[in-house]
Image (spheres, rainbow, N blue to C red):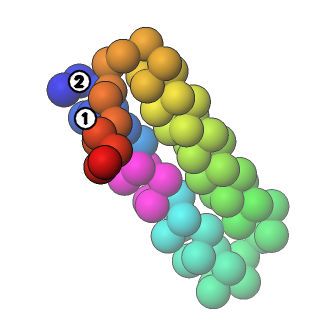
Amino acid sequence: MLLKLLVLLLLLLMIGNLMLGLRAMLHRRDPALMARYIGRRLWLAAIILALLILALASGLLVPNPTPY
């Protein structure tokens, strides 16, 4: 349960950084600021993916069974 809450929090942070990057792009602020927000979103996505892979490998998350 804690893992699912952590993934949800990271997803919300990722969406927040995406919105901040969009806002920086639309207001034509410093391009480095936009790149920082997009870079953070990319790092958060990589962390989420690594967490999910580790959780599946360790058995904390169980995927849906395949139909026969």
Q: Residues within 10 Å of mark 2 (few under 14, many from 20)?
A: few
Q: Residue furthest front?
A: 68
Residue at the spot 30% in from the left edge and 49% down from the top edge: 67
Q: Is residue 27 left or right of residue 60?
A: right
Marks 2 and 1 sit apart, C-alpha to C-alpha, by 5 Å
Image location of residue 15, percent across then percent down: 45, 61
Q: Magenta region, mostly helix, strand or loop?
A: helix
Q: Is residue 3 visible?
A: yes
Image location of residue 6, percent across then percent down: 33, 32
Image location of residue 59, percent across then percent down: 36, 16
Residue type, numbered disc 1: Leu
Question: For the residue labelled by badge 1, is the local secondary structure a helix, a strand or a loop?
Answer: helix
Which residue is label 1 attached to?
A: 5
Residue 23 is labelled as none
The stretch drawn in magenta includes residue 36: no
Residue at the spot 23% in from the left edge and 24% down from the top edge: 2
Residue at the spot 66% in from the left edge and 50% down from the top edge: 42
Q: Locate the N terminus and report the quarter of the image it occupies.
A: top left
| Front-most of residues 39 and 24 | 39
Range of the magenta residues? 11-16
| Front-most of residues 17 and 61 | 61
Which residue is label 2 attached to?
A: 2
Q: Is residue 33 above or below residue 53?
A: below
